[in-house]
């Protein structure tokens, strides 16, 4: 059988929120997935605070995002100000869910599964909002308007509901549709596509569109450095999550794994993405080339100073 759609090996080697939905998870009092189980700090009896590092970094992510929301509010003339704030707000909600789904507070299984469904839905919706931030940069429609914000929110909500429903139906077995995925090899095509693949596609498109915008429209290199740094930080986080995690867990006897570092590097990537957005809305860009200037005649969102305004 093809490995496509299987979560068992991922759950064996990493601490992923989706794993809370399956019967072998500690959330469902299962026996585990056969690898190193993250247990973290013992609270007495069979209760553990599984991932204190993730909880701390999620708290820092929430605080950092609130600061960036405030900083964004001050850039009143910047293109995509409301849209980048929508992304940051989604990231705050995602971080709150991660405290429960990955941080591992000793909570009722029903609560954890419910937050897992919300968490997975937010991952897809938030990466979609980020992609829409790249589209807004091309000024295909006026940013910050009811139409722009409404279309993004409606489409993001649809993705959130669709992904969340599949996750919750899997975890709570509302129907029999996803029951075969509850046991090894935990094959769930819907969740695999929506949780593992779709966000990566959205992120790849975001980076491609923003690279084109910076190089061909703005004619600048400096913002691209922020963009590349953000991509590298995100990639490092994924390496910790999917490659290094199991080795950390074994080396520390289940006290830590790669999840806390994935949370940290994702936070750093988000901050760097905000710096990228801020850099392309600065007031001190040099005059653009004639090619960019000719683009300005048809693109009212690109000011004569070579910046987005």
Image (tube, rainbow, N blue to C red):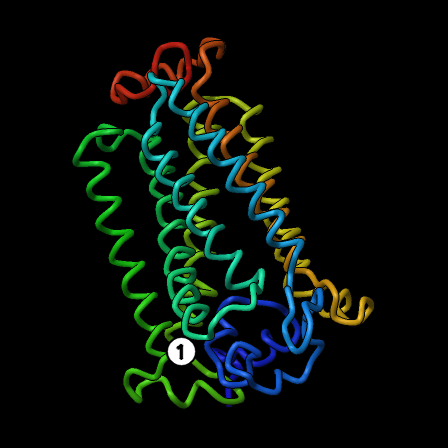
Q: Is residue 234 left or right of residue 202?
A: right
Q: Residue 254 placed where, x, y %?
A: 74, 70
Q: Which residue lies furthest to the right in this view?
A: 251
Residue located at (46% from left, 16% from top): 282
Is residue 219 shown above or below 194?
A: above
Q: How many marks?
A: 1
Is residue 139 shown above or below 32?
A: above
Q: Residue 48 placed where, x, y %?
A: 65, 69
On the image, numbered disc 1 is attached to which residue? 171
Determine whether the residue tagged by mark 1 lies in a helix, strand or loop: helix
Is residue 176 shown above or below 106?
A: below
Residue located at (48% from left, 81% from top): 22
Q: Quadrant of residue 130?
A: top left
Q: In this view, does 205 lie to the left or right of 226?
A: left
- Looking at this view, is 78 or 12 the one in front? 12
Q: In this view, does 69 lie to the left or right of 55?
A: left
Q: Which residue lies furthest to the front in this view?
A: 44
Residue located at (40% from left, 13% from top): 290
Q: Residue 294 placed where, x, y %?
A: 33, 16
- Looking at this view, is 214 or 279 the one in front? 279
Q: Residue 158 placed where, x, y %?
A: 24, 58
Is residue 156 shown above or below 167?
A: above
Q: Crowding at label 1, few (<14), some or many (≥20) Cα neighbours within 10 Å?
A: many
Quadrant containing the C terminus is top left
Residue located at (72% from left, 62% from top): 256
- Looking at this view, is 284 or 129 the one in front? 129
């Amino acid at each position: 059988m093809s490995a496509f759609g299987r979560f068992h090996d991922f759950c064996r080697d990493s601490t992923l929120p989706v794993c809370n939905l399956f019967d072998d998870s500690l959330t469902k009092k299962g026996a585990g997935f056969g690898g190193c189980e993250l247990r973290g700090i013992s609270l007495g009896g069979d209760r553990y605070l599984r991932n204190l590092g993730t909880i701390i970094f999620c708290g820092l992510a929430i605080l950092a995002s609130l600061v960036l929301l405030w900083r964004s509010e001050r850039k009143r003339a910047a293109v995509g100000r409301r849209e980048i704030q929508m992304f940051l707000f989604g990231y705050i909600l995602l971080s709150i869910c991660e405290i429960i789904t990955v941080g591992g507070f000793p909570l009722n299984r029903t609560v954890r599964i419910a937050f897992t469904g919300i968490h997975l839905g937010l991952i897809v919706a938030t990466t979609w909002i980020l992609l829409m931030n790249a589209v807004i940069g091309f000024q295909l429609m006026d940013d910050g308007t009811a139409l722009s914000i409404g279309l993004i929110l409606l489409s993001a909500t649809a993705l959130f509901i669709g992904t969340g429903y599949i996750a919750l139906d899997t975890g709570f077995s509302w129907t029999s549709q996803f029951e075969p995925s509850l046991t090894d090899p935990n094959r769930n095509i819907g969740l695999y596509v929506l949780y593992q693949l779709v966000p990566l596609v959205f992120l790849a498109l975001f980076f491609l569109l923003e690279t084109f915008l910076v190089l061909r429209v703005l004619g600048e290199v400096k913002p691209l450095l922020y963009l590349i740094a953000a991509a590298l930080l995100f990639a490092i986080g994924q390496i910790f999550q999917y490659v290094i995690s199991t080795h950390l867990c074994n080396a520390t006897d289940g006290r830590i794994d790669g999840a806390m570092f994935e949370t940290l590097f994702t936070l750093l990537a988000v901050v760097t993405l905000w710096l990228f957005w801020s850099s392309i809305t600065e007031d001190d860009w040099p005059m653009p080339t004639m090619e960019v200037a000719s683009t300005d005649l048809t693109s009212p969102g690109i000011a004569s100073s070579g910046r987005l305004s």
